[in-house]
Image (cartoon, grey):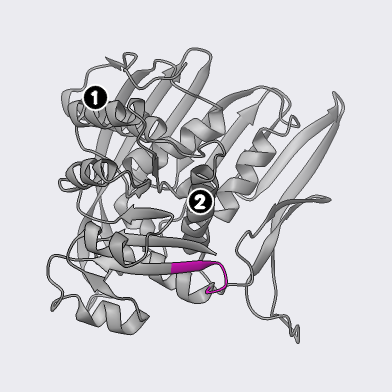
């Protein structure tokens, strides 16, 4: 049983609560910290979770293995510092901080012994993790290029780095913004009352990491729109991945095509329940759902994976998405927007958190 508390009661907090409810044999939320218990009473009641006005009160009621912060960007650094002062391991919401100066201050906490990992979940979404594993299985040979259109800012950069196998290498960055028209789709609150045309803003950026190229391409509509989908291209010397298909060379004359296929239970009379079992690539089960049989969305499965990996890290295993990685992705995100705003080519510099 993985036990954790949460600071914050906003939109993202409910993802953690839904995961714990769907997988009650794996996760237990010991409480929520809120500055306004009356305003947050509905969340606590719906999920059966007690409310506290301070982390100290939550910890005193029953110390969890770690705390999750799910608060606004501007508040998060202060919350992380406070929890570190309580000697409490933290899984931080993204991003951990907004500026380079704040990130350096947080990294100093890690150097002093604080345990901080970040809940960057996109790499752990089943379809992405399956393709990341395939990309680095050796079948594609050395990876030279990744074009990712799946998530905004640091999320998309995190995916791009993982597909490329990039750590803290320096980059040359150029970027451009493009505006077009689109029929407004749904957002967090639902569909609009009637059809209307709105502006869609797209950001396209190029990251040159020496002999490897990353291309970031995203517009915010992609999260909810039915007519703006994710896109992916990963190229290696022996093959490539395009969306849910791949091809690689068995030898220099024999291409092997592969399709990434989801395996869900509950279809056509299957009485096992309804959940994602895994993803098959050719003959290989390249991904198996670590929190099956919870009935959850892919994004919730990914966040649940972050919770599992955080518990393992607290138990002494290696971090999976450390504060250092999160700082690097946010740093490149800052430079990408600077390149788009100025029209200049920006070169990244090695930061204090870079471990190699």
Residue 95: quarter of image: top left
Q: Nearer the viewer, residue 347 or 194?
A: 347
Mark 2 Cα-neighbour bin, 10 Å: few <14, some 14–19, many ≥20: many
Observer-side mark, 1 or 2, equals 2
85 is within the stretch colored magenta: no
Would residue 337 be visible to someone looking at this image?
Answer: yes
Question: Total marks drawn?
Answer: 2
Label 2: state its secondary structure.
Answer: helix
26 is within the stretch colored magenta: yes
Would residue 11 be visible to someone looking at this image?
Answer: no
Position of residue 130 in the picture relative to residue 355 (left or right): right
The circle on residue 311 is 2
Residue bearing the label numbered 1: 339
Mark 1 Cα-neighbour bin, 10 Å: few <14, some 14–19, many ≥20: many
Of mark 1 and mark 2, the one earlier in the sequence is: 2
What is the x, y in percent for residue 316? 55, 40
What is the x, y in percent for residue 55? 24, 58
Q: Which residues are magenta?
A: 24-28
Q: CA distance from mark 1 to mark 2?
A: 38 Å
Residue under the point 43% across and 37% down: 158
The circle on residue 351 is none
């Amino acid at each position: 049983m993985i036990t954790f508390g949460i600071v914050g009661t906003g939109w993202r907090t409910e993802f953690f609560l839904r995961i714990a409810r769907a997988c009650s044999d794996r996760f237990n939320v010991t409480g929520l910290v809120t500055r306004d218990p009356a305003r947050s009473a509905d969340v606590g009641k719906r999920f059966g979770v007690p409310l506290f006005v301070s982390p100290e009160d939550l910890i005193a009621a029953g110390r969890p293995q770690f705390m999750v912060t799910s608060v606004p960007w501007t508040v998060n650094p202060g919350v992380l510092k406070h929890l570190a002062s309580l000697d409490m391991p933290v899984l931080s919401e993204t991003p951990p901080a907004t500026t380079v100066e704040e990130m350096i201050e947080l990294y100093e906490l890690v150097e002093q012994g604080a345990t901080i990992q970040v809940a960057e979940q996109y790499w752990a979404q089943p379809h992405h993790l399956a393709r990341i594993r395939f990309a680095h299985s050796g079948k594609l040979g050395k990876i030279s290029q990744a074009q990712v259109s799946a998530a905004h800012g640091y999320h998309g950069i995190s995916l791009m780095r993982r597909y490329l196998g990039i750590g803290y290498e320096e980059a040359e960055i150029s970027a451009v913004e493009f505006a077009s028209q689109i029929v407004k789709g749904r957002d967090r609150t639902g569909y609009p009352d009637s059809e209307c045309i709105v502006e869609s803003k797209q950001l396209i950026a190029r990251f040159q990491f020496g002999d490897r190229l990353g291309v970031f391409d995203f517009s915010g509509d992609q999260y909810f729109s039915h007519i703006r989908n994710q896109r992916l291209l990963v190229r290696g010397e022996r093959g490539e991945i395009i969306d849910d298909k791949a091809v690689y060379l068995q030898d220099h004359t024999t291409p092997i095509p592969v399709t990434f296929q989801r395996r869900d239970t509950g279809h056509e009379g299957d009485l096992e329940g309804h959940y994602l079992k895994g993803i098959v690539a050719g003959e290989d089960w390249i991904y198996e759902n670590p929190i099956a049989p919870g009935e959850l969305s892919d994004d919730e499965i990914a966040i649940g994976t972050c919770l599992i990996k955080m518990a393992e890290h607290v138990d002494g295993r290696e971090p999976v998405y450390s504060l250092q990685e999160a700082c690097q992705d946010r740093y490149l995100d800052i430079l990408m927007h600077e390149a788009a705003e100025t029209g200049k080519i920006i070169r990244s510099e090695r930061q204090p958190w870079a471990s190699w």
